[in-house]
Amino acid sequence: MERDIFPKDEVYNQLKDDFVLVAQYTDDPKDPVPAQKLSEYTGGGSFAVPLYIVADHNGKELARFVPPTNIASLSSKEFAEFLRNAKQKYASGN
C-alpha cells in the first residue's frame, strides 16, 4: 500500500492535504501496547494487517479500510474513494 497506492496522485494529494498519518506497528513482542491500543478499535477481535483507520481528533473511528487479500487487485481509485468518504464523514461531524 505505502509503496504502490499512497504515491498515486489521487491518494497522495488527499493524504498530504487532508490527513495526519500515523503508523502503528503491532508485531513487537517486547512492546504489547500498540497491539492493545489497536484492539480498542477492533473490539478485541481479530483484524487484518494492514488495517487503515480514519479517526477524528478525539480518536473516534470514522472509517476503516481492510485491503483485499490479493492486494495487487486494489486500485488507487478505490483507496482514494475511501479517503474521500472518510473526509466527508469528518466534515459532517459524524
Image (cartoon, rainbow, N blue to C red):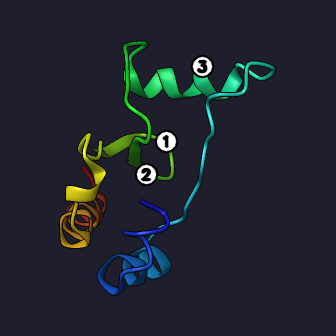
> x, y percentage for residue 71?
29, 51
- Please report the residue visible at 50 percent of the width from the left and 52 percent of the height from the top: 57
Q: Is residue 51 above or below residue 86?
A: above
Q: Is residue 86 above or below residue 76?
A: above
* Amino acid marked by disc 1: Gly
Q: Is residue 2 left or right of residue 92?
A: right
Q: Which residue is mark 1?
A: 59
The residue at the point 54 percent across, 65 percent down is 20
Local secondary structure at mark 3: helix
Residue positioned 63% across, 38% down in the render: 25
Cα distance between the residues tagged 3 and 1: 15 Å
Residue that badge 2 annotates: 56
Give the distance between the C-alpha atoms of the residues marked 2 and 3, in whole angstroms: 19 Å
Q: CA distance from mark 2 to mark 1?
A: 5 Å
22 or 78, which is in the foreground? 78
Snapshot quadrant of residue 45: top left
Please report the residue visible at 40 percent of the width from the left and 47 percent of the height from the top. 52
Q: Is residue 69 above or below residue 38?
A: below
Q: Is residue 37 left or right of residue 11?
A: right
Any mark on residue 78, and which? none
**Which quadrant of the view contains residue 31?**
top right
Q: Amino acid at mark 3?
A: Gln
Residue carrying label 3:
36
3 or 1: tag closer to the N-terminus: 3
Residue 78 placement (x, y as % from top left) = 18, 64
Q: Quadrant of the N terminus?
A: bottom left
Q: Amino acid at mark 2?
A: Asp
